[in-house]
Amino acid sequence: MSVLTWSSSPLKLPRPDPLIVIAMLLAAAVLLPIAVLGLSWLGDESEVWRHLADTVLLSLLANTLLLVLGVGVGVLLLGVSLAWMTATMEFPGRRFFDWALLLPLAVPAYVLAFVALDLLDFSGPVQSALRDWFDGFRGTSARRPALVIITLSLVLYPYVYMLARVAFRAQGRTLMEQARILGLSPVAAFWRVALPMARPAIAAGLALALMETLADFGAVSVFNFDTFTTAIYKSWYGFYNLNAAAQLASLLLLFVLVSLFVERAGRGRARYEQQSARKLKRVRPEFWRRWLLCGYASAIFLFAFAIPVGRLLFWVVDAGARDFDARYWGLVWHTLLLGAGAAVVTVATAIFLGYVRRTRGHWLSALAVRGATVGYAMPGSVLAVGIMLSFAAIDRWLNLQFGTGAVLIGGLFALILAYAVRFLAVAYGPVEAAFERIRPRILEAARTLGATPAETVRRVWLPLLTPGVLSALLLVLIDVMKEMPATLLLRPFGWDTLAVRIFEMTSEGEWSRAALPALTLVLVGLLPVYLLMKRTR
């Protein structure tokens, strides 16, 4: 007869990995603003919503939806057509346009917006010239939704162009030749073979462009085109109602999440594989078509980059050294200091997450990385509201417990945190690619040759990580310098930046006074564009 006996030894749970725990805490810090925005609906803001419903709510919904649809169509048409041209056709200037069509990425949307408004508005040089040439021309206002859509499309199409061009080039010659053998015309082969194969890359570029569209505050403010981003700003600084701003921000975030869900659902279970193929041979169209392609690419380059930069240069030269004062250099210093600080914090976090993901095969590490890099889908205004509400709650608790007063609100820490959450995905991409270059055989060879762990880090890890880390630092630096909504809402008193100065001057109609900080941002923005050009080649 057997007797059941119970062990008196305590149950030992597996010890959690501290690195994975830290990574999960970082992901929780990123997701905290989203949770806080959801909790904002517990507050009663019925009066504010009744006012919005009676006045602007329907127009906010319609304008935001119109902007997303219009810019989506615009960046697809421009990005895909230009990518197909430069990847598969030979025309005059093709080598120049191959990289020059990426340059509009260096132009902030709000910069192109106020330049376009200055050139095309009733008192601008274009309509003034038309009135001189045509007696019956009376002119009209340029503050129209169509011009907002065109402006954002010209700034954001390089996201689709860059990725689609690489995808078209990677397809090679074999697929197109097989399609032609099966009787498809060149146009039919493009629609039924090349375009579906490039869909993942095009969808990724479109998602980036749409997220930037939903996050835009500067361009829509210049055109007085009210969307959810402008409503958040007005609720915060107009109504002084942070809770109502949080509720509006949660609706904007819902727009972003629904857009991403629709794209993934549309893709379904489809899978796309690239074959190892011969190098794609460019087609040489007829003479008049070659020059038509050249004219199309030239027009896009002129309107998206050359004319805006030329107009900024004209204003700067015309103003002389008037704006090169102590305040300007203070703006440059604040911009660089915030950008450098945010870049160091963001890239250091990305390196840590990349190391955990590489060295820990646990599913929790992958979950932590995905949660920590979701912040790029959140507009700066949404992050600002979520962080402000979170810090306000923490400050109230600290004040009740220790009488500390306001510690977190109004400081640089909140702004740096917003930057880090917003652009962690930007930093993680190059860092992850750098980690992928470190093969296990290299580390094993170092250990076989007697290298200590410290020597392995110094002589193997760091040299291979350095290019990716430098790229990440530069990309985050430029993105932080151009970020307007989070800077406007969270900056400490007296910490104005170049982006804030542009907003102030364009709000007052001082286009020429905004030219110097705008040109500074454009010139600095050329550095990451150069890196992107090298990567895509």
Image (tube, rainbow, N blue to C red):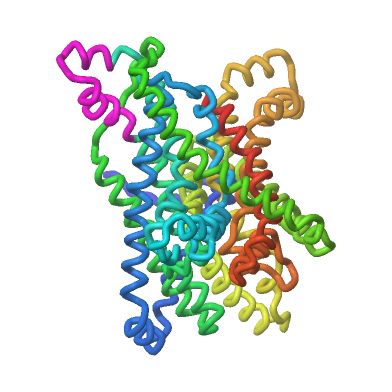
Judge by depth and name the residue closer to the eye, 537 or 6: 537
Residue 515 location, quadrant: bottom right
Residue at coordinates 64% horizontally, 77% vertically from top-left?
395
Assess whether residue 201 is covered by the magenta stretch.
no
Q: As drawn, is 137 to the left or to the right of 221?
A: left
The quadrant of the image that shows the N terminus is: top left
Residue at coordinates 56% horizontally, 64% vertically from top-left?
485
Per the picture, the main secondary structure of the magenta-coloured stretch is helix
Q: Position of residue 226 (x, y in %)?
A: 43, 70
Q: Residue furthest bottom?
A: 47
Judge by depth and name the residue closer to the eye, 416 or 442: 416
Q: Position of residue 344 (x, y in %)?
A: 70, 47
What residue span does the magenta drawing correspond to? Answer: 176-199
Q: Where is 292 relative to 311, above or below?
A: above
Q: Residue furthest right?
A: 326
Judge by depth and name the residue closer to the eye, 58 or 31: 58
Assess whether residue 195 is covered by the magenta stretch.
yes
Q: Where is 27 relative to 485, above or below?
A: above
Q: Position of residue 132 (x, y in %)?
A: 49, 58
Residue 494 location, quadrant: bottom right
Residue at coordinates 42% horizontally, 83% vertically from top-left?
43
Residue 280 visible: yes
Residue at coordinates 75% horizontally, 28% vertically from top-left?
458
Q: Where is 10 relative to 197, above or below?
A: below
Q: As drawn, is 9 to the left or to the right of 190?
A: right
Q: Where is 391 relative to 417, above or below?
A: below
Judge by depth and name the residue closer to the eye, 10 or 337: 337
